[in-house]
Image (cartoon, rainbow, N blue to C red):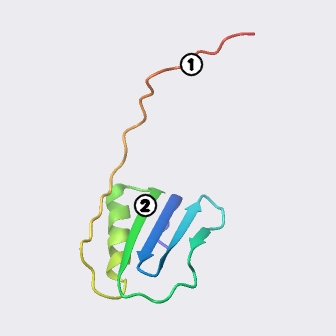
């Protein structure tokens, strides 16, 4: 809804009664695994790892709004939003003619 292209999203919800993990990449259908029929639980630990095509500050604001909309009491919330540096390979392969 925010018009941000999701490159990769992983979400893991763990509770005493089980876990559910969801992964979304590109345009593929979400991959879901875990105990979808687990008993309800009071405590949950939610971890979201998102790579998206937008400024880190914009993604942070979107995620903060989503977290604020979750029901229940929250504790121990931590969020890191950043743009990783480009990779610096240690070795480069040279193309050779055969």
Q: Left or right of 74: which side holds 50?
A: right
Towards the viewer: 13 or 54: 13
| Residue underneath mark 2 | 49
Mark 2 crowdedness (10 Å alpha carbons): few <14, some 14-19, many ≥20: few
Rendering coords of residue 79 (x, y %):
29, 63
Quarter of the image with the C terminus in it: top right
Return the residue found at the far top: 97
Q: Residues within 10 Å of mark 1 (few under 14, many from 20)?
A: few
Most foreground residue, 20 or 29:
20
Q: Residue 63: where, in percent of width, then height?
A: 37, 69
Quadrant housing residue 26? bottom right
Task: Give the residue displayed 56% in from the left and 19% down from the top.
Answer: 93
Spot occupied by residue 43 in the image (x, y as percentages of width and height): 35, 83
Q: Which residue is mark 1?
A: 93
Instruction: Report how far apart the C-alphas of labels 1 and 2 lie in the structure.
Output: 31 Å
Count of marks, rendered view: 2
Label 2 sits on a secondary structure element that is: strand
Looking at the image, is 97 positioned above or below residue 25?
A: above
């Amino acid at each position: 809804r925010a018009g941000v292209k999701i490159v990769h999203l992983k979400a893991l919800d763990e509770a005493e009664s089980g876990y559910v993990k969801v992964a979304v990449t590109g345009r593929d259908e979400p991959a879901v695994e875990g105990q979808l029929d687990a008993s309800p639980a009071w405590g949950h630990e939610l971890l979201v790892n998102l790579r998206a095509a937008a400024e880190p500050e914009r993604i942070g604001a979107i995620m903060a709004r989503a977290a604020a909309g979750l029901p229940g009491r929250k504790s121990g919330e931590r969020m890191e939003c950043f743009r990783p540096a480009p990779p610096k390979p240690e070795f480069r392969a040279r193309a050779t003619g055969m």
